[in-house]
Amino acid sequence: MRAVPRWALLSAALAPVLLIGGWSLAAARQPGGFDQVTGTISALAARDATDRWIMTLALLGLGVCHCVTAVGLRPARPAGRLVLALGGVATVAVAVFPLPSGRGSSTPHGLAAAVAFGALALWPALAAGRRPSAVSIAAGTACAALLLALVGWFVLELVAGGPRIGLSERVAAGAQALCPLLLAVALRGPVGVDGTRPGRPGATGSGRGAGRR
């Protein structure tokens, strides 16, 4: 049995393609150009954005991909998978509650974005476990720490009105979209009925005494 099914790998691979492709195409459609260093992703899906459906569909697809990937990441701990799915649902909510026209603010949009960024940064640490087939605690913690640092950069730019709000958001969001794919690829090998993978400690038939009575 495959630890991570192919459909989960596909959804994990599709997530960064939708996000990066969406913001690139949507930015290109804005009249007069769009500065992706200063302009946010949400601005491309705002009610007064040109062809806002592009970024809206990209965000909807991204959220769905995270939910599908969460179902397929079988070796990860249930808590981490649940938080990844929560991040996916919150991403869908970001698209459902767009920013209003005139660069105004939206409380539902802001709350959805906060939950999405937080959940998609924390889930790798919660997905880590001690089983040989699971995400290692060190890897999960390191991944979460990096994602939190990137989100922190974005928050600082946002609060201070910095000149790199769009850039920091794209770096953080892009890293969060890539993280499930990296873990899915790392866990893609087959597992036995006992939950271990061939060649890993505790795997049936591995070691010098394999096959001996």
Image (cartoon, grey):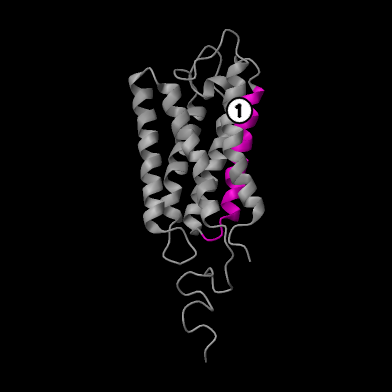
Tell which residue pokes out farthest to the bottom in this image.
213
Check the image and report above or below for 213 versus 165: below
Residue 37 rendering spot, x and y as whole percentages: 45, 19
Which residues lie in the magenta part?
A: 53-75
Location of mark 1 (residue):
22
Instruction: Kindly identify the residue that appears in the image at 57 percent across and 67 percent down.
Output: 191
Circle 1 SS class: helix
Residue 105 rendering spot, x and y as whole percentages: 48, 20
Give the tally of numbered discs: 1
Horizontally, is 79 left or right of 88 in the view?
Answer: left
Say which of 126 and 172 sits in front. 172
Q: Amino acid at mark 1?
A: Gly
Instruction: Kindly identify the residue that appears in the image at 54 percent across and 70 percent down.
Output: 198
Instruction: Kindly identify the residue that appears in the image at 48 percent across and 59 percent down.
Output: 77
Residue 145 rendering spot, x and y as whole percentages: 36, 44
Tell which residue pokes out farthest to the front in this image.
208
Residue 165 rendering spot, x and y as whole percentages: 41, 22
Label 1 Cα neighbours within 10 Å, binned few <14 / some 14-19 / many ≥20? many
Q: Is residue 46 visible?
A: no
Check the image and report above or below for 83 versus 191: above
Q: Is residue 172 magenta?
A: no
**Quarter that holds the N terminus:** bottom right
Instruction: Kindly identify the residue that appears in the image at 52 percent across and 61 percent down.
Output: 75
Q: Is residue 59 magenta?
A: yes
Give the main secondary structure, helix, strand or loop, of the magenta stretch. Answer: helix
Q: Is residue 186 visible?
A: yes
